[in-house]
Amino acid sequence: MSDHNYHADHSGTEVEPAQTKTIWKVFYILAAVTTLEFIIAFAIGAGTLKTAIFVGLTVVKAFYIVGEFMHLKHEVKSLIWAILLPCMFVVWLLIALLMEGDSIFQLR
């Protein structure tokens, strides 16, 4: 317990300094993307471009959170694709249904 490469947190367990450095890096990246979202929210008027930017940045943050905090980034590639492909198909299905529903409402 006297090893100087570790420091004790409040619960008494030891945390590697490299892990805390990674957590702070992830925090700063997510804070930067969120700050960019706030700047865009106040700089761009309402519209399709603003919505597309928000959806894109949200997807970027979601992938980064899943990769780092859920450790998917450190898994084998086949597991990553086994999770990612069905998610992409669900997103494609939602977009297709929204576009098709919109075209049906345009006919009436």
Image (cartoon, grey):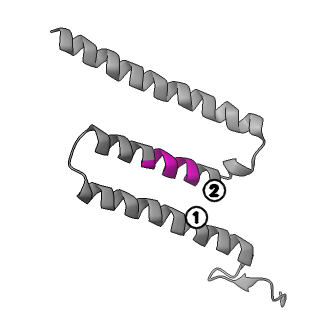
Left or right of 79? Residue 84 is left
* Residue beneath the point at 40% across and 19% down: 96
Q: Is residue 50 above or below residue 23?
A: above
Mark 2 vs mark 1: which is more N-terminal? 1
Is disc 1 placed on a helix, strand or loop?
Answer: helix
Query: Is residue 15 visible from the viewing direction of this image?
Result: no
Q: In this view, does 27 lie above or below 86?
A: below
Residue 78 quadrant? top right
Foreground of the two, 51 or 14: 51
Q: On the image, numbered disc 1 is attached to which residue?
A: 26
Query: Is residue 40 visible from the viewing direction of this image?
Result: yes
Percent position of residue 1, x then y: 83, 86
Q: On the image, numbered disc 2 is attached to which residue?
A: 68
Identity of the amino acid at label 1? Val
Q: Do the residues labelled 2 and 1 touch (CB within 8 Å)?
A: yes
Residue 81 quadrant? top right
Left or right of 105? Residue 54 is right
* Residue beneath the point at 28% across and 37% down: 48
Distance between the alpha carbons at the discs numbered 2 and 1: 8 Å
Identity of the amino acid at label 2? Glu
Numbered marks: total:
2
- Marker disc for residue 77: none
Q: In this view, does 71 lie above or below 24?
A: above
Left or right of 71? Residue 28 is left
- Magenta range is 57-65
* Residue beneath the point at 69% across and 82% down: 12
